[in-house]
Image (cartoon, rainbow, N blue to C red):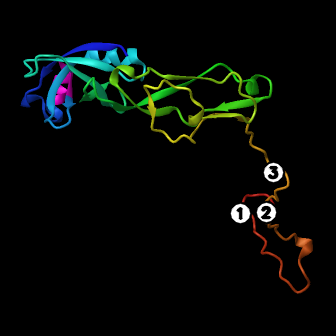
Amino acid sequence: MEQIALKAQLRDNSGNGSRGSKHLRDKGMIPAVVYHRGEGTVNIIVPDKEITRIIHAAGGENILINLTIEKDKKTKPRPVIIKEIQHHPVKRNILHVDFNEISMNEKIVVDVEIVALGEPVGVKQEGGVLDHPLRVLKIQCLPTDIPKHIDVDVSGLKLNQSVHVRDLKLSEKLKVLTDADALLLIVKHHEEKVVDETAVAPEVEVIREKKEEEVKPGEKPAAEVKPKEGEKK
C-alpha cells in the first residue's frame, strides 16, 4: 500500500476549545489528535490544504500516512491511519482529524470497500437490477497489505444469482472478519409499486338539502327569507 508523507506541528493549549480551534482553522490549520496504544495522545495541527488533498485523492480508501511532527520526541515519522474525520454539517469542510498510530509489523483491522465490476447478464438480458446490500468488508492484515478496494466481477450473474462473502477469492495475507454468509451482491427482479384496483374506495356521505316539494305533510317549510328594502324578489 502506498505511504503518504504529511508534516504536522505540536498544538499548544491555545488551540484547545471551540474558539481556539476556529482560530487555527482561520489560519489554514486543522486541529488533530494522534492515538497510540499504551501511550498518551498527542495534540497536533496539520495544514488544511494538505490533509484535504490527501483525503480527496484517496477517495474514501484507507490511507497509510508517514506523519512527521515538528519538535516531536520521536525522531522518526509515525506510521498512522485516519481513524475519524469530523466535517462541518453544512459547509462540509474538515473540522478535526483523529489519527491512529500503528506498527508496521502488527496486523490491524480495517474496512475495505467492495467494488462491483461489469454489468450482470441478469440486468442486460433479463430485466433485473443489481442490489449491493453490503459495501464494505472488515479485514485484518498488515498495514502494507491493505487493499485499496476489493473487486468483484458480477458480469456473469443471472437473475436471482448472488455473491456472498464466502464466495470471494482473496489473498492469504487477508483475514476476513465479516460473516461468511453475509450477502454482498444479488441480481433480483425490478420491484414496481402495484396499485390495488380492487381496493374499496371510502364511502362519502352526501348531505342534500330538502327541496320544498319534498317537505312531508305536517312539516313546516323552511322560513322564507324576505328581501331587504330596495331589493327585487
The kind of residue tagged 3 is Asp
Label 3: state its secondary structure.
loop
Which residue is drawn at the image coordinates 75% and 29% (left, top)?
158
Q: CA distance from mark 3 to mark 1?
A: 56 Å
Along the viewing direction, whichever of 87 and 108 lies nearer the viewer: 108
Whichever of callouts 1 and 2 sits on the residue coming sooner in the sequence is 2
Label 1 environment density (alpha carbons within 10 Å; few <14, some 14–19, many ≥20): few
Label 3 environment density (alpha carbons within 10 Å; few <14, some 14–19, many ≥20): few
x and y, in percent, of residue 108 in the image? 33, 31
Along the viewing direction, whichever of 191 and 89 lies nearer the viewer: 191
Q: Which image quadrant is residue 146 in?
A: top left
- Rendered-image quadrant of the C terminus: bottom right
Specify the farthest residue to the front. Answer: 172
Q: Is residue 25 magenta?
A: yes
Q: CA distance from mark 3 to mark 2?
A: 20 Å
Compared with 103, 196 (above or below) is: below
Whichever of callouts 3 and 2 sits on the residue coming sooner in the sequence is 3
Which residue is drawn at the image coordinates 8% and 29% (left, top)?
14
Q: Which residue is mark 2?
A: 204
Q: Which residue is mark 1?
A: 228
Q: Which residues are magenta?
A: 21-32
Q: Which residue is mark 3?
A: 196
Per the rendering, the mark at residue 142 is none
Label 2 environment density (alpha carbons within 10 Å; few <14, some 14–19, many ≥20): few
Q: CA distance from mark 1 to mark 2?
A: 38 Å
